[in-house]
Image (cartoon, helix red, strand yellow):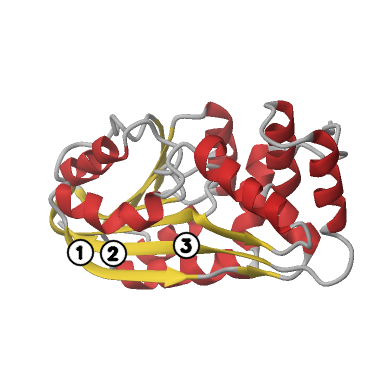
Amino acid sequence: MSSTLGVPVPDQAAYMLRAAAGDAGRAYKQQLLDLLDIQPGQTVLDAGCGPGTDLPALARRAGTHGTVIGVDRDPAMLVHARERTHGLDQVQIREGDIHALPVEPGTVDRAKTDRVLMHVAEPADALAQLHRATRPGARVGLAEPDWDTLIVDAEDLETSRAFTRYTTAEAVRNATIGRSLARLAEQAGFRTEAVLATTPVFRDFQDADHTLGLGRTMQRAVDEGHIDRDRGRRWFSSLSDGPFYASFTLVSVVCVR
């Protein structure tokens, strides 16, 4: 299936898995897992686990005597998560919303949520749920982009700016959540231990289009009347001509209960 810009609409699970497998995805995920300091035998929660991208890595760190709980509200994602963790007896897959986690209070030693809070209705309530689920002394890792920092190089600079404005104002529910993570975590009762900012850089147009949704988002902006159709077509077509550059800032926060 393609849009009128000729952009294929991806399978959501495949999109998430590919985004995590890229250089930028691997780097910040590894850093976040290292800072979580998961110990064998601990109970680990992945809130908003999607297709189970990180569950095998969490299971390796928790070991055979640990417990890894993957929670997502999308049944289709949970099918992929179960397939991905087949044979990992320490992994439990549960259907549920991050605003009402299906986890007993005070039972989790480590928790993470990765690029989930930008989509939820109430990030503060979601963090309150993580606080409820974790034990005193538990460590929690949060990672979210700040879409105000999205930069796409093009000769038509004004359209690039319009694209970022649309992404921030319309396309993503909580587009600047990255910069607010530490504040929101502390308001939820956590103590911030580390705040890190990384800047994934994309030099390959196809990779950037897939990960950042350049064509899909531009199509929405055009369809909703935010950007002129011909202007949007020219901008998107120009991105594949010659050297390409795009980047954004991703914020990771590690906090303690």
Q: Is residue 111 visible?
A: no
Residue 158 locus on image (x, y percent): 69, 53
How dense is the environment of label 3, judged by Cα within 10 Å: few (below 14), some, or many (20 and up)? many
Q: Is residue 238 left or right of residue 218?
A: right
Residue labelled with disc 1: 192
Residue 114 locus on image (x, y percent): 43, 52
Nearest to the observer: residue 192 or residue 257: 192
Q: Earlier in the sequence, mark 3 or mark 1?
A: 1
Quadrant of the image occupied by residue 179: bottom left
Q: Amino acid at mark 2?
A: Val
Cβ–Cβ under 8 Å for marks 2 and 1: yes
Residue labelled with disc 3: 250
Given the current orientation, which residue lies at the most extreme left position?
Answer: 136
Residue labelled with disc 2: 254
For mark 2, give the secondary structure: strand
| As drawn, 135 above or below 225 | below
Residue 197 locus on image (x, y percent): 42, 70
